[in-house]
Image (cartoon, rainbow, N blue to C red):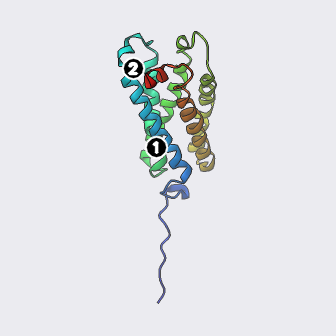
Amino acid sequence: MATIIEKPKRAPYGKPLTPDPFERVLSVGAVVLLACIVVAVAKGRAQWGMIPAMVWPHLLTIVIAVALTPVMLLRRRGDTLHRQLGWVWVVAMLATAASSFFIRDINHGGFSFIHILSLWTLFQVPLIVWSARTHNVRQHRSSVRGMVTGALLVAGFFTFPFDRLLGHWLFS
């Protein structure tokens, strides 16, 4: 008697339903970053009134992007919810990058290293959208991983040291 072996279920475009180890690491990084942001903002409550108004939309959009990142990396891809959440993530990333250019007064009127990543984000996000729309899964996946690694996690964790606002709040 022959045994029937079922193939593992796959998401659209052949992507397995289980995330790979790198995506799990990126997801953990996003959760840790989100926790640090939430704790820092809560600890800095006494100074909220002294913060320039443009910082708040910037923080809100980055929290949205960071919170969606593990959801997007760990759940099924290619379905309607993935596309809808992807649009929210993309808009949040663009808004975060664009708003960073208006937060120079915290940096003594100048730009910082993180602003280079903001420029990169403004160019990279349309590539992410284009690769998804053209079903270039390999490029889309690679671009998203690069964006999460560089513009989200590296830039995010660089907001804590070097005499920056969130670092003061988190470590005070």
Residue plotted at (36% across, 25% down): 42
Q: Are marks 2 and 1 in contact (CB under 8 Å)?
A: no
First reached walking from the N terminus: tag 2 or tag 1: 2
The amino acid sitting under disc 2 is Gly
- Residue 70: which disc? 1
Q: Amino acid at mark 1?
A: Pro
Q: Residue at x 47, y 83 (%)?
A: 3
Q: Which residue is mark 2?
A: 44
Nearer mark to the viewer, of 2 and 1? 2
CA neighbours of label 1 inside 10 A, class few (<14), some (14 to 19), many (20+): some
Residue 134 visible within the image:
no
Is 54 displayed left or right of 111 in the figure? left
Q: Position of residue 32 (x, y in %)?
A: 46, 38
Q: Quadrant of residue 172?
A: top left
* Image location (x, y in percent) of residue 111: 61, 16
Label 2, label 1: how far apart the Cα atoms are? 26 Å
In the rendered view, does 83 fall on the left or right side of 125?
A: left
**In front here: 50 or 69?**
50
Q: Residue 152: where, in percent of width, then height?
A: 54, 34
- For image coordinates 62% across by 45% down, the residue present is 142
Query: Is residue 31 in sight in this rendering?
Result: yes
Q: Nearer the viewer, residue 72 or 129?
A: 72
Which residue does the image show at 51% across and 56% down from the upper left?
Answer: 12
Q: Secondary structure at mark 1?
A: helix
